[in-house]
Amino acid sequence: MTDIQTREDLHLLMSEFYKKLLADDKINFIFTEVAQIDLEPHLLDLVDFWEQILFDTGSYRKNVLQIHIDINQKLKLSEEHFSIWLHYFNTTIDENFEGQIAENMKTRALSIATVMKIKM
């Protein structure tokens, strides 16, 4: 396996990650019913977000915290939701990539989830 290097790698990662999330009844309703995401544009937003975080491209312009605060107002996001999300996130990275950027991505995801839980 190689490390995460390109936008295409991030798109593959987000696609595989969302397959797992959307197959899990403990969390999929947050995306399909509460947030009502349109999957393909959502995946592109996620790729933009992670591309900015990992490679400093500057392509993401939305307020990720506010988006999650808005969702949390509709449905309280629980510790279990965050745990499930992080589990699938880390598992998907580990199944597809290895290296410093992959490890950095997992660390950043944990940090972001922790900040979100505190701010919500």
Image: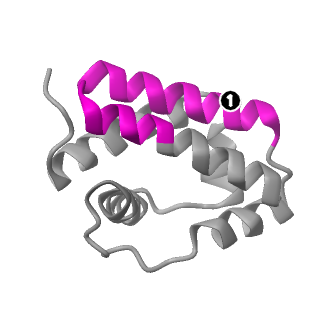
Q: Height in image: 101 above or below 73?
A: above
Callout 1 amino acid: Ser
For the N terminus, the quadrant is top left
Q: Residues within 10 Å of mark 1 (few under 14, many from 20)?
A: few
Q: Which of the 4 quarters of the picture holds residue 9?
A: top left
Q: Which residue is mark 1?
A: 83
Q: Height in image: 96 above or below 50?
A: above
Q: Is residue 40 magenta?
A: no
Q: Height in image: 72 above or below 110?
A: below
Q: Position of residue 30 (x, y in %)?
A: 68, 48
Q: Position of residue 28 (x, y in %)?
A: 62, 39
Which residue occupies 64% across, 29% down?
84
Report the magenta residues as a range. 78-107
The residue closer to the viewer here, 86 or 53, is 53
Query: What secondary structure is the magenta-colored segment mainly?
Result: helix
Which residue occupies 77% across, 49% down?
117
